[in-house]
Image: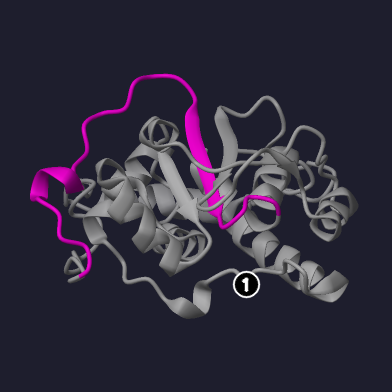
Amino acid sequence: MVLNGYDGRRDGRDQDGHRGPDHGAQDRRDARRADPRPPLTLIESAPRRAILPDDPVPEQAIRPAPRPPGHFRVVYVCSANICRSAYAEGRSRALVGRRGWVRFTSAGTDGTDPQPMDPWMAAELVARGGDPTGVFGARYRPDDLEAADLVLPMTDQQRLRLLDEVPACHARIFTLGQFTRAAAEAGRRLRAGDLVAWIASQRPAPDPAEDVPDPYGRGEAAARETARILDDYLLELLPRLA
């Protein structure tokens, strides 16, 4: 996936898109030819981790049924859907552009009637090339989450709440920080749906230190810091959903 202003490539191209000599590519091809082992399967590609005690789930839920073809749907979730998840939605759209096959929406665990983004977070989004127009806070609907391919709440507390309220999505709910970290461990060779299934099979432990802080009512500096944290996650994650 090519992000607007960032493509995550490490293929030897300069900023103008010209490719220099890639001696590493030939070395990698030679190494693959010399390796007699069969390629790793999805489940063999990394050691399994134990399922967490707070995540009781039958084995069949870890291997979810194939999702219907079409766009890959990501839903960001926070509390009121006017700061963190709204920013993540708008920023993701700006980074990926309209040609990507990933579709982004957002929702809140406690949102009520549709309301515009928090002004400070909206300003941060605009400053980074996003557009808050049409991004309105609203409470999530279970059927929207069940139709999603990946649900990314901002905190572990929100993750636990969604697991309790929408158990059908168990294998597709991770905090943004948790999923981004696990995706980096998986590498870039898996397509989005396979990546979600692989991470669900590993069930990496969430880390409260990876929670995205809520900037609501805390002013410009807090909004800027939250936007920075979200950008760090999104710039790492989005190229891996190609």
Residue 201, position as x, y percentages in the image: 22, 54
**Amino acid type of the residue that numbered disc 1 sits on in the rendered structure:** Pro
* Residue in the foreground of this view, choosing between 107 and 172: 107
* Residue in the foreground of this view, choosing between 153 and 97: 153
Residue 95 in view here: no
Residue at the spot x=31%, y=27% of the render? 67
- What colour scheme governs how the chains and residues are painted in the rendered image of this protein? one colour
Residue 31, position as x, y percentages in the image: 34, 54
Whether residue 231 is situated above or below residue 139 in the rendered picture? below
Would residue 57 be found to the left or right of residue 141 on screen?
left
Residue at the spot x=55%, y=32% of the render? 102
The quarter of the rendered structure image containing the N terminus is top right
Please tell me whether residue 153 belongs to the stretch shown in magenta: no
- In the rendered image, the residue lying farthest to the left is 59
Q: Would you name the residue on which mark 1 appears?
A: 213
Residue at the spot x=84%, y=57% of the render? 124
Start-end of magenta stretch: 54-82
